[in-house]
Every structure is written in C-alpha cells, then in structure tokens.
C-alpha cells in the first residue's frame, strides 16, 4: 500500500508511545475523579475510546492559535456522545476547557452535559442521539471539499451506531463524493447499552467487509494501541474516505468494569473508586 502524504505527516512522525500512554492513564484517573461528583454518567464508554480520542487531538488535529487561544485547523465530532468524558478531559488538559468546567459537569450551573452541546468550547456539534454524527461530518467534509480547503474532518462513532441506517446513508454519500478529507473511527467494544452486539446482531460481523463494500478504505487495529492507530492513519492511501475500526474493551483499565454491561451507566462507589485508582496507579509504575 502506498501511503498518502498529508499536512499531518510531520505531526505523526513526532509520536511518542510512552507520553501517550501516560496521558491516557492520567485521563482515566481524571474521569474517575469526575465520577465521584455525580451519580449518572458513562465511565466505561469513555474508557473504551480514550486512546483514539487522544491520538485525534494530540497527533491528528492541527493546532492554530488565534488571539492567544488554542483552536484547531481541523474538526472533530464525538458522534458517540455518551463517551464525551474522554473528550472533556482532553480539552481540559490542552486548555480549551477549565478545571471549573469539569467540576461543574452535569450540574445546573455548568455548561458540560452528559452529551456534547454545540457552543461549548471545543464542541463542534451537538451529539448523543446515535446515528447523527456521520451525516454531520460528511456535510462538513463536503463543504471543505467544495471550498478547496485542506481541513480534515474526524468523527468517532460507536459500533452501536452501525445499526443506524443514517450512518450507512452518510457513508454512501461520502464515498460517492470521494471525501478524502473525512476520517472516521469506530469504537468496536462489542457492547450496546446492556447487551453484546455479537449476541444480538451476529450478521453485523465481519464489520470491515461491510465498510469496504460501501466504498471506504478501512482497517482494523487494537483500539488501545496508540502506535498502531497512528501508523494506520499515516498509511492510508488518501483516495477515498477512511475508517479505522478500533477493537476496544469497554471499561478498559479497570478490571471490574471491563466487559461488564452495567458499567455503561454506573458510577463507582467510594470503595470501587479507590480500587480503580489503585489499579491504574499500578499500571503506571
């Protein structure tokens, strides 16, 4: 495969695995800290897509500082809105959101909800109603193509969103329009809210064959291996829209959350919180 040379190559070439790993551990601990402030949020869904979100912001999105504020040349949509804590903690880390913003998460006085809202700094579309993000991303990428703008549009969707017809309709249009500036990520953790995708929808697999049949270049990697994610994106041909399918673990990093459906909704109690922090501390040593 001949890889495409893009404006992102110099950034991708500076990737450091150790730094990315430390960041993701820090982000998981921060999400756990936030989980003690409110009783209803999605910890496990945020953990499953965290490495992909980290790579998008730290390796793919091109920064463009304006008037002393960090903005990005490219766009990112968290179509999997219930995983937004992964996005919020990254935006806090890079200075787009404040610590106070995160402390006021899901409170009457705060601007951060359980799903992303357009108008919040760093949020480019309101999402959470699953199946809408791919269509929005396709429209944004098409607008940039018409304007001959070199911006890229990145979108992260859940595997559950691949059950939505609107997702596939947008994918067909993106392929027909040859939107080479559209890069999608799938969080393939094999769970919907409370059931395995592979149990309820066995015809869903293999996923790659279906994505490629819709005119996309697609590859599957370990969604928690940051180096593999970076290498896969760097190696794309750039001839058609691109989709990276990340095989992930829901609740990744905390043993009692991994693959357990109830953690789609639960927040850890104080004892579980202490255990989770301990496990993440051990991993970082």
Image (spheres, helix red, strand yellow):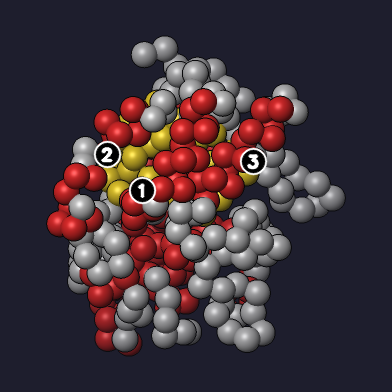
Is 69 or 182 nearer to us in this picture? Answer: 182
Is residue 12 in view?
A: no
> Residue 101 falls in which quadrant of the image?
bottom right
Q: Residue at x 62, y 65 (%)?
A: 117
Q: CA distance from mark 2 to mark 1?
A: 9 Å
The numbered disc on residue 207 is: 2
Identify the secondary structure beneath mark 2. helix
Identify the secondary structure beneath mark 3. helix
> Residue 181 falls in which quadrant of the image?
top right
Horizontal and vertical percent for residue 222?
Answer: 28, 41
**Who comes first in sequence, dot 2 or dot 1?**
1
Identify the secondary structure beneath mark 1. helix
| Marks 2 and 3 in Cβ contact (< 8 Å) | no
Residue placed under numbered mark 1 in the picture = 162
Q: Residue at x 62, y 44 (%)?
A: 75
Residue placed under numbered mark 3 in the picture = 140
| Marks 2 and 1 in Cβ contact (< 8 Å) | yes
């Amino acid at each position: 495969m001949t890889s495409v040379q893009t404006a992102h190559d110099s950034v991708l070439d500076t990737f450091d695995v150790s730094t990315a790993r430390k960041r993701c551990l820090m982000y998981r601990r921060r999400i756990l800290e936030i989980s003690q402030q409110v009783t209803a949020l999605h910890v496990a869904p945020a953990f499953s897509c965290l490495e992909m979100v980290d790579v998008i912001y730290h390796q793919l999105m091109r920064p463009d500082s304006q008037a002393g504020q960090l903005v990005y040349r490219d766009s990112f949509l968290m179509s999997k809105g219930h995983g937004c804590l992964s996005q919020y903690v990254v935006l806090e880390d890079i200075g787009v959101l404040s610590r106070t913003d995160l402390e006021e998460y899901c409170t009457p006085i705060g601007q951060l909800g359980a799903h992303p809202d357009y108008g919040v700094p760093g949020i480019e579309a309101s999402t959470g109603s699953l199946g809408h993000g791919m269509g929005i991303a396709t429209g944004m990428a098409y607008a940039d193509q018409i304007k001959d703008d070199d911006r890229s549009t990145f979108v992260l969707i859940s595997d559950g969103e691949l059950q939505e017809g609107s997702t596939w309709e947008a994918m067909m249009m993106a392929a027909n329009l040859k939107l080479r500036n559209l890069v999608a990520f799938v969080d393939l953790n094999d769970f919907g809210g409370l059931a395995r995708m592979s149990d309820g929808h066995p015809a869903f697999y293999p996923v790659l064959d279906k994505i490629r049949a819709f005119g996309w270049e697609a590859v599957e990697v370990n969604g928690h291996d940051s180096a593999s994610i970076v290498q896969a994106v760097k190696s794309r041909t750039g001839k058609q829209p691109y989709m990276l399918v990340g095989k992930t673990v829901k609740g990744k990093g905390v043993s009692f959350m991994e693959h357990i459906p109830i953690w789609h909704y639960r927040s850890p109690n104080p004892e579980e919180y202490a255990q989770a922090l301990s496990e993440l501390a051990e991993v970082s040593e």
